[in-house]
Image (tube, helix red, strand yellow):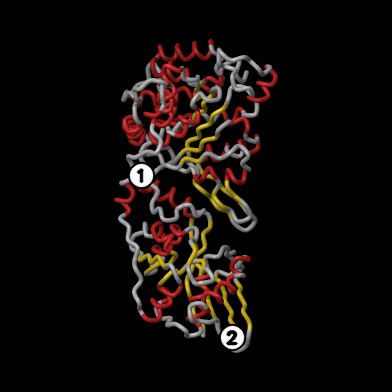
Amino acid sequence: MLTKVYGSAVFGVEATTIIVEVNIDKGIGYHLVGLPDNAIKESNYRIAAALQNNGYKIPGKKITINMAPADLRKEGSAYDLTLAIGILAASSQIKSEDIERYIIMGELSLDGSLQPITGALPIAIKAQQEGFTGFILPTANAKEAAIVGDLKVYGIDNIKQVLDFFDQGTPLEQTIIDTREEFYKNLDFPEFDFSDVKGQESIKRCMEIAAAGGHNIILIGPPGAGKTMLAKRLPSILPPMTLHEALETTKIHSVVGKIKNMGLMSQRPFRSPHHTISDVALVGGGSYPQPGEISLSHNGVLFLDELPEFKRGVLEVMRQPLEDREVTISRARFTVTYPSSFMLVASMNPSPGGYFNDPDAPVTSSPAEMQRYLSKISGPLLDRIDIHIEVTPVPFEKLSEERKGEGSVEIRKRVTAARELQTARFEAMANVHYNAQMNTKQIRQYCKLDDKSKALLKNAMERLNLSARAYDRILKVARTIADLADETELNGDHISEAIQYRSLDREGWLG
């Protein structure tokens, strides 16, 4: 007897429906075809034990299983439940009338209990698009799949529940989530708050500007000055994610199995990889491509602590994703594209010893050592960082103050107001949503200077010996400063503040 059961495979952040055809005939043997990987080939041992322990058995006949489309590589252990149900239905141990209306996925333990799977959200989206009635999967993944409307999602703990559902009509409990309520309830409780930061008012202002315009930022200062503390608090002042952004971000995290029992992500991601990371782990890839850190920080913040300690090759592969806001991974048989629109926050010591710009500390690094240290960061990468700011240690008087600084919620209100101005300004443009994404043509259009401001910028570029690449960056940042002040025209105040944020372009740093 021939039976069809439906599963799903995830490529990139999209799912493809897999038809599992099970045929049972005279003879003996177990044949699994359709490009399964080793985890799927081993499934027959798990399935046999799970069925045995629940009062069923694999028939002693010739079993042929085809996973179609047969030229598409299938991987992982999530097909255990699909194969088990197919075998039982084909051998008439359970009824098979309704099986074709469901996507069935789950990894089996030997006692029949189910382990979580990856990519439940993309699979649920595809199932809904293709008109399936429901999605049966492990309980641990039910919340993320239930985000999708018009699809019945059943979270189960044991294969026995599925068998009773199909064979005896025993109802399964449907997982229902109010997506909007789930999304909005966690918005105003940031884990890290700017009110914890003592002093550093100028740096907090700089962070506010970076958040308002989506600008990449690099913090330069000695150890213990608060660079990491400030970076960790940046997501708390970014505008709340829209429902569309939340769904997009949750999809990527679902593919790598980081969502279990969470439902929809409402907080922007903050990723902080160690400097020993490989380029594949950062950008994504592998023989079976997976999203890397830059895609996991999509719609959030990627924090690279001690930037010059990262391998140069690792930093160079980030140049294209920073520009295109997506990363494409090509293999011989297929190509996958992951979104990677993130804010880059980098921090570094000004010298190998760490204390170059601290007036109270001894200079321990020679100019040659410093030049070698700083030259690890290439010009083209720095070119994609709009704001450079020096962070100095906080004096004891400020640290011991009882007074709390301004909280993240107040700062976020100003940032959100500035972002709304930018959204309205770039409404007609498909790929530009905030100031940092402007190209040269848009800078000329939206960052017009009066004669006084032009003279100020010309004077500053000559006096401070700023590079040509700094010109556009200064105008972008000045546009954001004007948006925060709710002013339509750029003036000298906006330009002079933006000029302060180009430390690394000055003679003596990377000259």
Q: Is residue 338 left or right of residue 354?
A: left
**Residue 186 location, quadrant:** top left
Above or below, comparing residue 267 to residue 212 in the picture: below
Helix, strand, or loop for circle 1? loop
Identify the residue at horizontal 65%, vertical 36% (top origin): 311
Numbered badge on residue 60: 2
Residue situated in front as seen by the camera: 440 or 87: 87
Mark 2 or mark 1: whose residue is earlier in sequence: 2
Q: Position of residue 371 (x, y in %)?
A: 66, 21
Q: On screen, 50 above or below 387?
A: below
In this picture, is 184 found above or below 496? below
What residue appears at the point 42 percent right and 74 percent down from the top-left corner?
162
Position of 102 compared to 9: left or right? left
Q: Which mark is residue 242?
A: 1
Residue 236, quarter of the rendered image: top left
Q: Secondary structure at mark 2?
A: loop
For the image, the number of numbered tags is 2
Q: Residue 99 at what x, y percent from top left?
A: 42, 76
**Which residue is more in the foreground, 429 or 181?**
181
Specify the quadrant of the image occupied by residue 287: bottom right
Quarter of the image where the C terminus is located = top right
Q: Alpha-carbon neighbours of circle 2 within 10 Å: few (<14), some, or many (≥20)? A: few
Q: Which three-letter amino acid code belongs to the residue tagged 1? A: Thr
Task: Classify residue 346 as left or right of residue 425.
Answer: right
The residue lying at 51 percent from left, 68 percent from top is 18
- The Cα atoms of the two marked residues, 2 and 1, are separated by 54 Å
In the rendered structure, which amino acid carries the disc numbered 2?
A: Gly
Up-down: is 110 above or below 242?
below
